Amino acid sequence: MARHKVEISGVNTANMKVLSSKETEELFIKMKEGDPFARDDLIQGNLKLVLSLLKRFHHREENMDDLFQVGCIGLVKAIDNFDLSHGVKLSTYAVPMILGEVKRYLRDNNSIRVSRSIKDLAYNSMKEKEKITLEKGREATIEEIAESLGENISDVMTALDSVRSPVSIFEPIYNDGGDTIYLCDQIEDERLQKKDLDVNLALEDAIKDLSERERRIIDERYIIGKTQIEIASELGISQAQISRLEKNAIKTLKKVLR
């Protein structure tokens, strides 16, 4: 099967080597023994890990070459600090460090200005999150991060939220093959809510002016969804009479709601 050539930061991703667990272990042993080429081989053999993690940021406008280079910094840090005696895979140790570097880069290049104290708390929170995640083998909770830092939970949450990159209201959030739902579709417009409330109150008053039969027809036609024939059968009158009553009711409602 042909491999597609995709270049990022001048690296042909189709030719990236992926190391096996055994090869990784052997290279770490060689690096510890002073082999000058082992470290480079470890970096080259894990570049696809960096590339796979960058898929999480594909919707962003940042240059992917820049993100790839930043991710590689995280990979290098992970390799330099990795210890085989911990009994975990390099990828397990490297993933949070790579993501941490990328997220710090995105935070520092955020278009929204955030105070230094909040940035520092966010940075410390993310660092602590990586540490706890590695220790416990699962995602750290906000409560654990706050307790470890000696900070309020609300302050940690605010700090982490403040360094998240802004999202366009036209960001697609769901698509089942039909119409796409965008973020703006889920945002409530308080002005429209107030307008709808006024309309609903006026409609309630207008319905009171209808006869009991007209109210029943409007309710069954537009709330329940019955046809004129079904309502006519229930009331024991002709469809023509139902149609007339419905038109009169709508005319009355329009007159009141203008």
Image (tube, grey):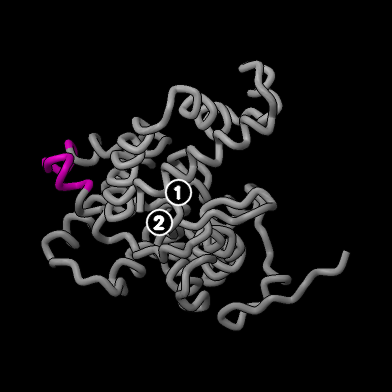
Residue at (66% x, 30% y) in the render: 228
Q: Where is mark 1, residue-wise?
A: 93
Q: Residues within 10 Å of mark 2 (few under 14, many from 20)?
A: many
Residue 241 in percent (x, y) is at 63, 30
Asked where in the image residue 70 lies, by quadrant, the reply is: bottom left
Q: Quadrant of the C terminus?
A: bottom left
Q: Are marks 2 and 1 in contact (CB under 8 Å)?
A: yes
The amino acid at mark 2 is: Met
Give the dominant element type of the magenta stretch: helix, strand or loop.
helix
Residue at (16% x, 43% y) in the render: 154
Residue 131 in percent (x, y) is at 31, 45
Q: Is residue 144 magenta?
A: no
Report the magenta residues as a range: 147-157
Residue 183 in percent (x, y) is at 45, 56
Give left or right: position of 204 versus 230: left
Q: Where is mark 2, residue-wise?
A: 97
The amino acid at mark 1 is: Tyr
**Does the image show residue 30?**
no
Q: Secondary structure at mark 1?
A: helix
Residue 53 in percent (x, y) is at 53, 58
Q: Secondary structure at mark 2?
A: helix
Q: Is residue 153 magenta?
A: yes
Q: Is residue 21 above or below residue 33?
A: above
